[in-house]
Image (cartoon, grey):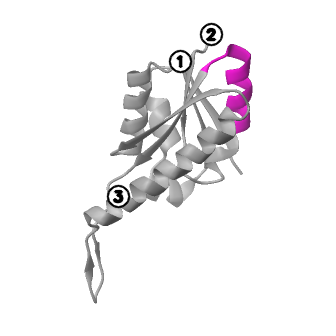
Amino acid sequence: MYQTILVPLDGSKRAEVILPHVQEIARLYQAKVVLLQVLEPQRSVVTAESLYIPGQEEIERQSQLAQNYLVARQKDLKELGLDVQTQLSYGPVVEGIIQAAEQIQADLVAMASHGRTGLSWVFYGSVSSGLLNRIDRPLLLIRSK
């Protein structure tokens, strides 16, 4: 049923709540797991005293941190006997997840929802809501606490 499972992670412990569920599904179906992190472009910050524009060094530092994070999670899952790959992409998160799912032909996208509501959801947007409305494949959402 599931041959490839895409698991978007954002580097937080809350997002990792999905991993035990993915482990069981991947083990049951002998599926490949692809861990994905999408880095959104950093925006310039203007304060009364200064202007901060992220440079190439900062972008590379963020990319390296994300890659190190993904490799560490990959190692954890490989130690459990799973076939795990990592992928890092750049751009808007929802679009990045959808593109990755299409690219790797994921049979399932599995992720934890942070469960934001109210003004927090309006301000930050909702990745899970965006995916629910746009993705064309099965989506497993686990609410993190």
Instruction: Say which element carries label 1.
Output: loop
Contact between labelled residues 3 and 2, with CB atoms less than 8 Å apart? no
Q: Is residue 122 visible?
A: no
> x, y (%) of residue 111?
59, 37
| Three-letter amino acid code of the residue under disc 2 | Met
- Residue extending furthest bottom? 49
Choose top left, top right, bottom left or bottom right for residue 90.
top left
Name the foreground residue: 4 vs 46.
4
Q: Quadrant of the N terminus?
A: top right
Task: Name the quadrant containing residue 17.
Answer: top right
Tell me which residue sits at (57%, 15%) in the image: 3
Number of numbered tags placed on the structure image: 3
Tell me if label 2 and label 1 are in contact, CB under 8 Å: yes
First in residue order: circle 2 vs circle 1: 2
The residue identified by callout 3 is 60
Q: Is 30 within the magenta?
A: yes
Residue at label 1? 107
The residue stretch that appears in magenta = 19-31
Q: Secondary structure at mark 3?
A: helix
**Residue 2: where, in percent of width, then height?**
60, 15
Q: SS of the residue at dot 2?
A: loop
Q: CA distance from mark 2 to mark 1?
A: 8 Å
Compared across the picture, whether 45 is left or right of 88 comes to left
2 or 3: mark nearer the eye: 3
> Where does the image place residue 11, in percent across and percent down from the top left?
56, 52
Label 1: how many Cα within 10 Å (few below 14, some 14–19, many 20+): some
| Label 3 packing within 10 angstroms: few (<14), some (14-19), many (20+) | few
Q: CA distance from mark 1 to mark 3?
A: 31 Å
Residue 12 has which mark? none
Using the image, tell me which numbered label, if any, was put on residue 1.
Answer: 2
Tag 1: amino acid? Asp
